[in-house]
Amino acid sequence: MKSLGVNSYRFSISWARILPKGRFGEINQAGIAYYNELIDALVLKGVQPFVTLCHFDMPQELEDRYGSWLSSEVQEDFGYYADICFKYFGDRVKYWSTFNEPNFQVTFGYRDGTFPPSRCSGHFGNCTAGDSETEPYIAAHNIILSHAAAVDVYRTKYQKDQKGMIGIVLHCAWFEPFSESEADGLATDRANAFFANWFFDPIVLGRYPEEMSRVLGSTLPEFSSKDMEKLKQGLDFLGINHYTSYYIKDCIYSACEPGLGTTRSEGSFQTIQERDGFPMGKRVSFFSSAPSYIDRTGSTTYLKFLDTIFRTNMAVSFACWICRVIWVGNTFTHKEWRKW
């Protein structure tokens, strides 16, 4: 990496490698030694480590004991795990992401069941257990509060001395109305709410998007006053994984083909990538109060390498006004999550 001119490296720590039994067992010192060796090697070569605490995986023990993200108990476990990572690695790691793409994690893990723990119901997927209408929101709620727990640990125990930053990485597609109709405009607001803002708004504003609350009602969990205090810790930066953008068509007042997003529990909208033969994707204003990092772009095959360079250069030209870093995904990204 050093010979290629790489000055930063983004990787994830395996929670199960550090705590195979969660807080119910011992710390795996072999796992600590492995990551210490990796971090030391990066620092020695002048490569800045950007570390993610959770990229979809967790100790099987926690799934077996209490259903992992479906239980509020997971918040204590994640805070404990984060504390250990900050303690052992924080003297050299200055950039921490609590989660990578939790909006993908709960959608594929608890709605269509293609990611672990493979839970879904009805027409959403082929699973042996789960509730696609409610469980994604329960899991998301506990992930958001687990993020807050980790940030609280870092702020109160480590940040002053270690002088690092902590944030979260979200999958951030962008949406625009397919037509100028009011219905498509409202559907676009719902699409943004049910995607990145599902996680971004609680972490920054302390509440879920209004569009989600109106559609889901009591299905959407509520934050207690204590939760809201935790969420005030916020973040130091936002990591953005951006793959594409979509046009949005309304599915409440308009007829839609079945597909992603079209049910009430998903926001009742349809995604379309082209209009009049032109693909979607343009620069817009979103926010500017926190540094942003494009945490993933790129191609998985050598034959598309030039396309990767093109997309990276385009991302730089469009995002340089706010973006601090861009990472390109590699050949091995996501191989462990599902069959592609």
Image (tube, rainbow, N blue to C red):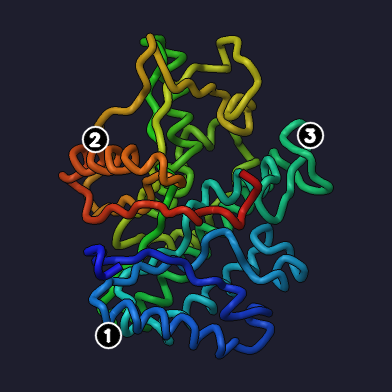
- Residue 161 appears left or right of 90: left
Residue nearer the viewer, 175 or 7: 7
Disc 1 is placed on an element classified as: helix
Residue 165 image-quadrant placement:
bottom left
Give the x, y percent position of residue 66.
74, 67
Q: For the N terminus, which image quadrant?
A: bottom left
Residue 196 image-quadrant placement:
top left
User: Tag 3 or tag 1, which sits nearer the N-term?
Assistant: 3
Q: Residue reaching furthest left? A: 321
Q: Is residue 140 above or below residue 340?
A: below
Disc 3 is placed on an element classified as: helix
Gap between marks 2 and 3, in whole Å?
38 Å
Which residue lies under the disc numbered 1?
A: 161
Instruction: Indicate the amino acid at tag 1.
Output: Asp
- Residue 339 appears left or right of 144: right
Which residue lies under the disc numbered 2?
A: 285
Q: For the C terminus, which image quadrant?
A: top right
Give the x, y percent position of residue 146.
52, 65
Residue nearer the viewer, 229 or 240: 240
Which residue is at a point 56% across and 11% down the rendered structure image?
Answer: 253
Disc 2 is placed on an element classified as: loop
Instruction: Indicate the amino acid at tag 2.
Output: Ser
- Neighbour class for label 2 at 10 Å: few (<14), some, many (≥20)? few
- Do the CB atoms of the residues marked 2 and 3 lie less than 8 Å apart? no
User: Tag 3 or tag 2, which sits nearer the N-term?
Assistant: 3
Which residue is at a point 54% across and 23% down the rendered structure image?
Answer: 269
- Do the CB atoms of the residues marked 1 and 2 lie less than 8 Å apart? no
Which residue is at a point 72% across and 50% down the rendered structure image?
Answer: 118
Gap between marks 1 and 2, in whole Å?
35 Å
Instruction: Indicate the amino acid at tag 3.
Output: Gly
Which residue lies under the disc numbered 3?
A: 122
Give the x, y percent position of residue 205.
37, 50
